[in-house]
Amino acid sequence: MKTLYWLVKREYWEHRGGFFLAPAITACVCVFIAIMSLIGLEVLGRHAGLFQLNGSDNGLNINDHLDAESLRNRGIILDKFLCLGAVIPLAVMAIVVFFYCVGSLYDDRRDRSILFWQSLPISNWKTVISKVVSASIVAPLIATVLGIIFGFALIVLCVLYAAFHGVNVWGVLLAAHPFRVTLDLIALIPLYALCALPTIGWLMLCSAWARSMPFLWALVIPLASNLIVFWLHLLGLWDLNGLWYFGHITSRLLFSVTPGNWWHFIAPTSLNGVASHNDILDALNLAQNYSALTSIEMWAEAVAGVAMIGAAIWLRRWRDDS
Amino acid sequence: MNAVVTANGLSKRYKNAIALDNVSFEIQPGRIVGLIGPNGAGKTTVLKAILGLTDFQGQLNVLGLDPRTQRDKLMEQVCFIADVAVLPRWIRVREAIDFVANVHPRFNRAKCEAFLARTKLTPDQRVKQMSKGMIVQLHLALVMAIDARVLVLDEPTLGLDILYRKQFYQNLLEEYFDDNKTIIVTTHQVEEIEHILTDLMFIRDGKIVLNTDMEALGDRFAEVMVSADMAKTARELNPLDERQVFGKSIFLFDGVEHSRLAVLGEIRRPSVSDLFVATMKGTYA
């Protein structure tokens, strides 16, 4: 356990730039853009005569007496800001994790530093598992925490701006559910990790197997096989539909590290629920999201992911080219 | 004493070449063994087999363990430095020490830090900011602080200047080596390690062509400088090699009694590099 902890720590040392700095910098840039937009809005608004300089705004102070319903809606908007804040670093993280996995078992073979790691008494399976944990748990956790901080920053900006225009912000703030959203986002990480296994497994398998250009192999094999399936179907030689293959194989191998990777498995009725509801709390509803666990396909994919990770461990042990 | 390494009928084929051809040898504890051979002779394959980094046919026993199946356990007792460029470029001195200290049960942190204190390395320095010599200092500091029974060195000083090379072997001898440890080293810079070796193994085309300890080497091989008039007699004794220096011939004999050679001229112990060149004649032809 201690070795595993230090291996994960080692991954973080090596990839601090991708796991922490990239989402953090993106979030900071977004905050900066948000500030610029608000200032721009303010200036343009004043030029357009929307707000008066003496502080008695005509444009915005209609909000002073909100009924319960519109208060609720404004609370939801704040919740959405928090979610948006989380999604941006998570999207960056997805890209980082993709390339992290592609290089994870290849880069140290290429620069031969694998010889140093293998001079230490560490099992190969621990090394590989530490990389899986970094990709599926550590990186999403860091990105989610950063996202929540970023989301809170967005909320603070909105509230300050509204307060600047004399809106009663306390009512709106109380109608929002920042802590529940935070908890939900964090509680969804294990589900994310489980559903990301196919891509993580596939990319790490390619990374352990390829003698060169693991990225190209990882991309070409699913796409080319998809093309063949599509072609066979077109000729009427095979029943398997190319589109089905894309949705259930190709895209799962390549894109299941994207945020919300489990939506695929939520039954259509509840998915409609997610899509149509305004309330972000419903979209984050844990019971509904975790209903993905009842999908046989999800478990089949997770098992396939684990099998590919197993193959990567075997290759890592016996690939002899450094 | 039990041998540290016992190899029996070791063979390894790559796709289009034989790297090891039915090799057998034993290495005893407390020895410093030089494994010397031309490029592509199979030195690295032997080391990789000992370290469990490659598959092979035959039997190999290292410290009572099979490197293929018990590698994780074996590596607690075996250290290796595989040339200088294998430390990951991103790692900092501090991180490398922290990591090894926490994953290696036989690592002595104080020893490592004491060794580094005598170098110019600073805790926050990254490997990519270091010269080759500094990288090898860091690697050596990490390895010397591990109380291992076998140390494997594969071209450890390649690309280092003479100061670092001398210092490397000096540190190894003075501060690391003792009767319980065994060092196996491959290198092309034979002259520099000649005086520290206790055993010598020559390997050529996947076969061990010479396996001897250094004392026996002096008895078995002899170098004699012979003047022109005696050269014919010398040639009759079937020398391994002959070369000309200042109008005299230098002959290298294998297994000829010293009393018979004494009449030809002054007997000297041949240098390992001369012996190597004589043994490997025609390797690349």
Image (cartoon, coloured by chain):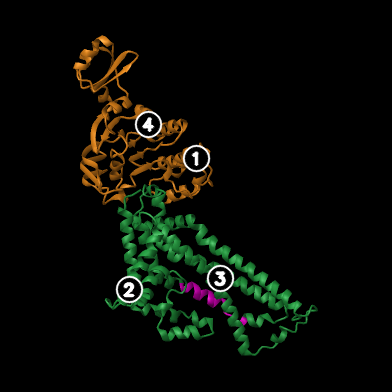
Mark 3 is on which residue type? Ile
User: Viewer-proximal residue, B219 or A255?
Assistant: A255
Q: Is residue B1 visible?
A: no
Residue B238 vertical position relative to residue B30 in the rendered view, above or below: above
Which residue occupies 73% across, 80% down?
A166
Q: Amino acid at mark 1?
A: Ser
Residue in the image at 69% along x and 88% along y: A65
Q: Which residues are magenta?
A: A174-188
Disc 4/disc 2 C-alpha distance (Å): 60 Å
Do labels 1 and 2 touch, CB within 8 Å? Answer: no
SS of the residue at dot 3?
A: helix
Q: CA distance from mark 3 to mark 1?
A: 43 Å
User: Which amino acid type is shown beneath numbered disc 2?
Assistant: Trp
Report the front residue among B277 and B216.
Answer: B277
Above or below, B4 against A231 in this view is above
Image quadrant containing the N terminus of chain B = top left
Of labels 3 and 1, the one closer to you:
1
Density class for disc 3 (Cα within 10 Å; few <14, some 14-19, many ≥20) is many
Nearest to viewer (mark 2 / mark 3): 2
Q: Is residue A199 left or right of residue B238?
A: right
Q: Is residue A219 magenta?
A: no
Mark 4 residue element:
loop
Disc 4 with disc 2 on a shared chain:
no
Residue drawn at the location 58% of the way across and 69% of the way down: A149
- Residue lying at the far front in this picture: please name it: A235
- The hue used for chain B is orange
Q: CA distance from mark 3 to mark 4?
A: 59 Å
Nearer the camera: disc 4 or disc 2: 2
For mark 4, what is the residue?
Answer: B189
- Dots 4 and 1 on the same chain: yes
